[in-house]
């Protein structure tokens, strides 16, 4: 069931659209912010609120890189793997993640602290390689800087 | 040299909010509305200015607007959508504007709304741009409080409402009809055209989807006129352009410069030339959906209308440099993997063709490619050419591939003859062992 706060937030958002389902992405992201990911149960709750079928909403939820239909760690590190970051060594950043936290792309660390995902160009190409942890973007990420960045995310 | 879009931006990357924005002439263009300039006159001014869409297509903005039904019989509501789904790899220009001067986008959207008699706007922002989202949210709230939004502008009946829509990360949403589906809460696949969004767009209503940088230009055109705007440019397209460079150069970055600036000036004067130890081999002029340019093209003026079509197109104007330390095949493989991953899957040639292309390129990198694979790559550039797919994604993906096959053909062939990637340390070791 949607919590009172979630419901209020969603009601604020749907006002911006002539049709409730226009708020589908906002609704998925709003609920995900509080629950970490979108479970089948959350999906059903949101679909009901938006007056959509769950299948319809799932066709949206599964379409986007930032909507998680599986549980993720407490923090998510997105390593940009598009061209400018690739040229400047994003693969070494991914390797460093693996060395430090024993996580491959798409995996969550055993302690549930961290999920590492690839991401399309973060739009910080002038500071490649870039990565985003939760909502914060870091540029010029040399492998030796990874630990000090990640230490902030317990 | 005038830099209307960026002259006031803070060097430290902090944002300018309402008070500071107004103190430096912000929202002055709305006087055009309150002193009675008619929407059709705003449209005419924009046509005369020679403004072209900055999202990569370069379509004349005035012409685009001319298809929107006007007058008392026009279907209402009409919508203005800012396309801030900046996901074209190598492109970061809209972010600079939105993070630094969020009110500029609000003002530009009000002006577009007035010109087209549209009362509602959405800023469609890519989900990863959290800082832009925070700053735009504050700017929108300030604009409501100040009465620029949500109530009739003084002396008029025109009022504009504006909402921020943060997306959740999918490249195809930059395609305007896919973006419209996304905003409606549908799976973001492109729509058939016609009908064009100008007449049948968001929720079936007349809709203009405009790139963020394009909208930033509108207040300045209103304030200073079409003639001034033309003088900013070195070519017949009006205005300045947000150019950028990434890759192995001394100073990667962005610069607002006259349209028609050459790649050589950008590379040598602004980016400080190639980084130590790197030699220039080619560049993609504006995101990865554009064709390679090589040494002989460096003195071409970079604009929309004079760009020779046999070379390619300007795209977003934020260029990516290919240097001699980077394998051109590996470079193109990275691009094609991106396109394959981001294909929405709606039409077969794109959904099936792009992974095939990526697989073929992988075979080159891993030393399994034959001459037949080279022909297969060539054939894909024809099978996925414009007209064979539902939208521009796959044709865009073929632009760098086709031009790479033309300019870097010997590098592809070398992968076949030596059975691996000449740039890869691993395959070099394997060759020694063999």
Image (tube, rainbow, N blue to C red):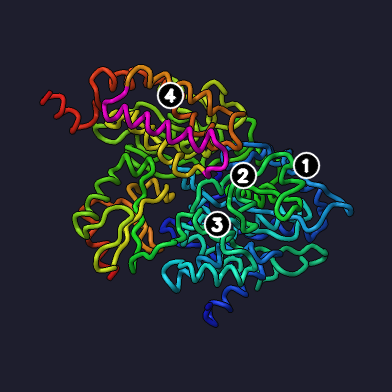
Is the residue marked by circle 4 packed among few (<14), some (14-19), or many (20+) residues within 10 Å?
many
Which comes sooner in the sequence, label 2 or label 4? 2
Say which chain tag 4 marks. B
Please check the rendered image and state whether residue A87 is part of the magenta-colored stretch, yes or no: no
| Residue at left offset 52%, top offset 66% | A28
Residue carrying label 4: B377
- Pick the front one: B256 or B181: B181
Q: Which residues are magenta?
A: B344-369
Q: Position of residue B179 (x, y in %)?
A: 61, 50
Protein chain holding label 3: A
- The image shows residue B99 at horizontal and vertical percentages of 49, 58
**Was residue B366 drawn as part of the magenta stretch in this picture?**
yes
Residue B346 vertical placement versus B108 (above, below): above
The residue shown at (70%, 70%) is: B147
- Which picture quadrant has residue B160? bottom right
Q: Do the numbered discs 1 and 2 sit on residues whose CB atoms are within 8 Å?
A: no
Q: Residue beneath label 2, please?
A: B190
Task: Work out how far the residue at label 2 is from the one at label 4, CA to CA, in angstroms.
Answer: 26 Å
Q: Of the two numbered discs 4 and 1 on the same chain, state the one appearing first in sequence.
A: 1
Chain where mark 1 sits: B
Report the residue marked by disc 1: B66
Distance from disc 3 to disc 1, alpha carbons, whole Å, reads 33 Å
Give residue A60's mark.
3
**Which of these two is toward me, B357 or B88?**
B357
């Amino acid at each position: 069931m949607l919590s009172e706060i979630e419901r209020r937030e969603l009601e604020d958002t749907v006002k911006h659209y002539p049709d409730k389902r226009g708020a589908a992405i906002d609704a998925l992201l709003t609920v995900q912010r509080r629950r970490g990911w979108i479970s089948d149960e959350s999906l059903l709750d949101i679909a009901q609120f938006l007056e959509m079928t769950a299948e319809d909403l799932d066709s949206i939820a599964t379409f986007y890189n930032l909507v998680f239909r599986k549980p993720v760690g407490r923090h998510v590190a997105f390593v940009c793997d598009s061209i400018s970051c690739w040229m400047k060594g994003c693969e070494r950043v991914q390797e460093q993640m693996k060395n430090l936290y024993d996580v491959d792309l798409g995996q969550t660390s055993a302690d549930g602290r961290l999920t590492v995902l690839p991401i399309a160009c973060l739009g910080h190409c002038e500071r490649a390689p870039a990565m985003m942890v939760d909502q914060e973007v870091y540029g010029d990420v040399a492998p030796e800087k990874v630990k000090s960045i990640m230490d902030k995310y317990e | 040299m005038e830099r209307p879009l960026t002259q006031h931006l803070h060097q430290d990357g902090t944002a300018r909010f309402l008070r500071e924005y107004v103190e430096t002439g912000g929202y002055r263009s709305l006087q055009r509305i309150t002193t009675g300039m008619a929407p059709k006159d705003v449209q005419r001014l924009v046509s005369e200015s020679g403004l072209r869409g900055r999202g990569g297509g370069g379509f004349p903005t005035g012409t685009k607007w001319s298809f929107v039904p006007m007058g008392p019989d026009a279907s209402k509501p009409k919508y203005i959508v800012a396309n801030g789904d900046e996901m074209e790899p190598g492109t970061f220009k809209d972010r600079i504007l939105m993070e630094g001067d969020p009110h500029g986008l609000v003002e530009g959207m009000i002006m577009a709304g007035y010109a087209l008699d549209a009362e509602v706007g959405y800023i469609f922002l890519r989900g990863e741009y959290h800082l832009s989202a925070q700053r735009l949210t504050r700017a929108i709230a300030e604009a409501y409080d100040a009465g620029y939004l949500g109530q009739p502008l003084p002396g008029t009946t025109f009022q504009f409402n504006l909402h921020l829509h943060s997306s959740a990360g999918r490249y195809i949403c930059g395609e305007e009809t896919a973006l419209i589906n996304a905003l409606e809460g549908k799976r973001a696949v492109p729509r058939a055209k016609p009908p064009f969004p100008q007449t049948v767009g968001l929720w079936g209503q007349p809709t203009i989807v405009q790139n963020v940088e394009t909208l930033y230009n509108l207040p300045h055109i209103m304030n200073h006129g079409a003639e001034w705007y033309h003088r900013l440019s070195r070519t017949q397209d009006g205005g300045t352009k947000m150019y950028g460079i990434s890759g192995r150069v001394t100073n990667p970055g962005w610069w607002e410069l006259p349209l028609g600036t050459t790649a050589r000036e950008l590379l040598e004067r602004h980016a400080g030339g190639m980084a130590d130890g790197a030699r220039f081999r080619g560049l993609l002029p504006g995101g990865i959906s554009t064709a390679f340019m090589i040494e002989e093209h460096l003195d071409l003026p970079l604009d929309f209308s004079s760009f020779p079509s046999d070379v390619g197109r300007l795209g977003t104007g934020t260029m990516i440099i290919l240097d001699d330390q980077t394998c051109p095949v590996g470079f193109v493989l990275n691009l094609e993997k991106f396109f394959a991953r981001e294909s929405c899957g709606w039409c077969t040639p794109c959904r099936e063709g792009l992974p095939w292309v990526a697989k073929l390129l992988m075979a080159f990198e891993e030393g399994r490619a034959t001459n037949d694979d080279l022909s297969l790559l060539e054939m894909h550039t024809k099978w996925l050419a414009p007209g064979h797919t539902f939208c521009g994604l796959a044709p865009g993906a073929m632009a760098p591939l086709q031009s790479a096959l033309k300019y870097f053909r010997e590098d592809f062939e070398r992968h076949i003859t030596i059975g691996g990637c000449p740039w890869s340390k691993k395959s070099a070791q394997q060759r020694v062992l063999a």
